[in-house]
Image (cartoon, grey):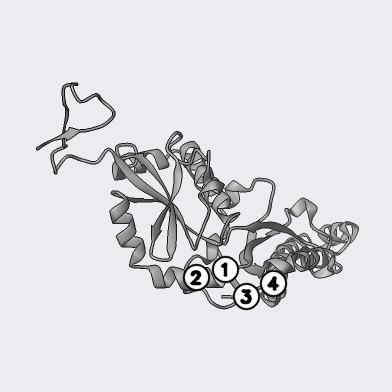
Amino acid sequence: MTGTVRGAAPPDAPATTATAAPPDAPATTATYAYAVCRGGDESALAGLPGQAPGAPVRLLRFGDLAAVVQDVPAAAFGEDALRERLTDRTELERCARAHHAVVAAAATAAPVLPLPLATIYRGDARAEAALGADRDRFTVALRRIAGRAEWGVKVYALPAERRSVPAAHTPERRDDERAAARPGHAYLDRLRGVRHERERRQEAGLQVVEEVDRVFAGLAVAGRRLRPHDTNLTPGRGAHLLNGAYLVDETRAGEVADAVRRLRQSPECRDVEIELTGPWVPYSFAEAGVTGAGG
């Protein structure tokens, strides 16, 4: 099938023809979706490299919502190619940072629901159909996060060398005297002491987690306890006791900082480290099913 391309050429110039691609030819680009929003402003997305530098990040409207999308090379973002790239930690981090940069930019213009990393469709039509089928769910979630931000609260047990000395600690001199008089009993006492101290720290850590979660549940409209980090990824820190995410009204940011300050100063928290991160785009609350604080 051929067609004549008519443009600014003079009437006596020879006609230029273009041959359409066969209908079964594979697409050269795919549609990468970053987020869903209501409204949005493409000027906030201008110049972002995203996952494919050179291809503009744009809005793809579906009904009264829009997806933040970008054309990416189909070959590089096919299932096998993408799986291979994302098994490399450096490449995974680069892709995640690029994804977040686009989501964060879009959030400056409207509330956004981040989509998972590497949400890819075979063209705009497929993206519109798939996202449009979830329009009701997106609408509920967008209503919930409007005017709110996510805060991360992490609680770590302090390493042994940084822990406070328990009040019931027996002086080393008395331990030495007991060991000299009854070495077998002293050894068993030390084992029991180590076990009791470990149990005390564990119980104290659980109490701290519950108190921190209680304080933030009182500030938040929704909360989640996420999977703790692998301690190998946090060298120099003790066990990761709490990885909490809390959805809080933007007007209460000052209360969030005050709550963390009070918790850090409380005697109950002397053997833990409390880390506050945020405010973030509410990644942890993109699913419409998360509706209650402390969930």
Which one is nearer the viewer's eye here, 64 or 288?
A: 64
Tell me, for residue 221, which label it has, or none: 3
- Determine the CA span between mark 2 and mark 1: 6 Å
Residue type highlighted by circle 2? Ala
Of pointers 4 and 1, the one earlier in the residue sequence: 1
Determine contact: label 2, label 1, CB under 8 Å: yes
User: Does residue 231 appear left or right of residue 9 in this picture?
Assistant: right
4 vs 2, front mark = 2
Q: Secondary structure at mark 2?
A: helix
Residue type highlighted by circle 3? Val
4 vs 3, front mark = 3
Place of residue 187 in the rendered image (x, y in percent of width and height, measured from the top left): 74, 60
For residue 147, above or below residue 48: below
Q: Secondary structure at mark 4?
A: helix
Determine contact: label 3, label 2, CB under 8 Å: no
Of pointers 3 and 2, the one earlier in the residue sequence: 2
Of pointers 4 and 2, the one earlier in the residue sequence: 2
Residue type highlighted by circle 4? Phe
Tell me, for residue 145, which label it has, or none: 1
Tell me, for residue 141, which label it has, or none: 2
Residue type highlighted by circle 1? Ile
